[in-house]
Amino acid sequence: MTPETPLAELALQVPAATQVFHRHGLDFCCNGKRSLAAACESKGLDPRSLLEEIESATQDSSAGIDWTARPLGELADHIVNRYHEPLREELPRLLAMARKVERVHADKASCPRGLAAHLETVHAEVSSHLDKEEQVLFPMIRAGQPAPVPVQVMTQEHDEHAANLRRTRELTHDFVPPAEACTTWRALLMGLETLERELMEHIHLENHVLFPRSLSAASAAGHA
């Protein structure tokens, strides 16, 4: 690991690095091709300090599954079970909480006005995205069929999801609750922060593992 190593490569080689990236607001999914040094420069961070944090996080965590070596169908199933299904449950819950917070605290200057409307958009876009992956792209990947156009479309939509995450942070002031925040408000912010972390892990696994491996495998099969 060096400061010139791309974020996505660090996340693949050292899964615990994703915890550190999230802690410092570094986008390792859609901007994973940037080097650690470049990403740190944009945030005013010391890349050497982050490498030390990653090393410490690695020592504290247990090794996970190496998805760069597992069958593609198994990886697709993991993504659906680990990320898609929880998203379908969590987004409506967070949206309901955001509506309640805006309704109850509308008279407060710190009220996250516009958050509920934003989450409605996020819910609709993510739901559509998950359906397209499960109904179109993932069956093609499991069958070993080349799918460059669906992969391109899903990657572009991932960029849109990343932009939505940034907007969520803006509306919630980086998930920091104001002093007057009630229990629901604080729970909402905690849930949104967890959503950001898991969605970034989800996108990273698709952008940098599933999609490249599926395209490579389909290409190799075509030339066999």
Image (cartoon, rainbow, N blue to C red):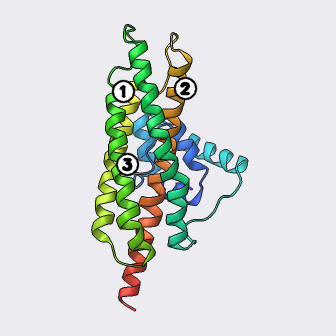
Which residue has dot 2 on it?
187
Q: Which residue is mark 3?
A: 127
Please state if 128 lies on the left or on the right of 39 as rendered.
left
Say which label, 2 or 3, has the lower sequence index: 3
Q: Nearer the viewer, residue 223 or 181?
A: 181
- CA gap, disc 1 and disc 3: 18 Å
Report the disc number at residue 115: 1
x, y (%) of residue 10?
Answer: 53, 55
Whether residue 203 is situated above or below residue 137 in the rendered picture: above
Residue 13 in the image: above or below residue 104: below
Q: Earlier in the sequence, mark 1 or mark 3?
A: 1
Q: Amino acid at mark 2?
A: Ala
Q: Earlier in the sequence, mark 2 or mark 1?
A: 1
Amino acid type at image mark 1: Leu
Vertical placement of residue 53 versus 35, above or below? above
Q: Position of residue 67 (x, y in %)?
A: 56, 65
Q: Decide if residue 167 is on the left or right side of residue 196.
A: left
> Residue placed at 63% from the left, 44% from the top?
52
Percent of width and height locating residue 188: 50, 27
Vertically, is 88 above or below 190? below
Q: Nearer the viewer, residue 24 or 45?
A: 24
Q: Secondary structure at mark 2?
A: helix
Q: Which mark is residue 12?
A: none
Q: Is residue 191 visible?
A: yes
The residue carrying pointer 3 sits among few (fewer than 14), some (14 to 19) or many (20 or more) residues within 10 Å by Cα, namely: some
Cβ–Cβ under 8 Å for marks 2 and 1: no
Give the structural element (helix, strand or loop) at label 3. helix
Amino acid type, residue under disc 3 in the picture: Ser
State the image coordinates of residue 181 (x, y, percent, origin top left): 51, 14
